Amino acid sequence: MKPMNSMILVLVSLLLAACSPDNSPKPKLFEEQRSALDKAKAVDNTVQQQTQQLQQNVDKQTQ
């Protein structure tokens, strides 16, 4: 085999190896922050519902 053909074969092999899928587990970035945000959103919904109910009660009493 000619040296140029060998070099091309090596380069093609390296390119194919570089394109192989990465099966390593991905780190879960900001997982704690996402969890805290989800909890805050749930609490916000509860507070909004209670505020709406309180406003309705106040409106009923003032009529």
Image (spheres, rainbow, N blue to C red):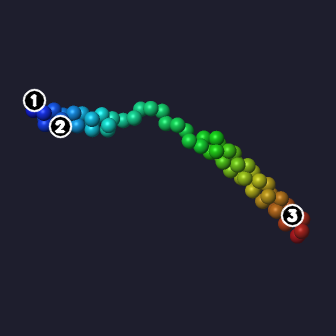
User: Which percent across, then down, holds residue 4?
Assistant: 13, 37
* Disc sitting over residue 39 in the figure: none
Q: Residue at x 49, y 36 (%)?
A: 26
Judge the density around disc 2: few (<14), some (14-19), many (≥20) Cα neighbours within 10 Å.
Answer: few
Q: Which residue is mark 2?
A: 8
Q: Residue at x 75, y 56 (%)?
A: 48
Q: Earlier in the sequence, mark 3 or mark 2?
A: 2
- CA–CA distance in space, label 1 to label 3: 91 Å
Circle 1: element type: loop
Question: Could you give the CA–CA distance between mark 3 and mark 2, rounded to whole angstroms?
Answer: 81 Å
The residue lying toward the viewer, choosing from 56 and 8, is: 8
Amino acid type, mark 3: Val
Label 2's element?
A: helix
The residue to which callout 3 is attached is 58
Q: Is residue 23 left or right of residue 9?
A: right
Please, which residue is most extreme toward the left here? 2
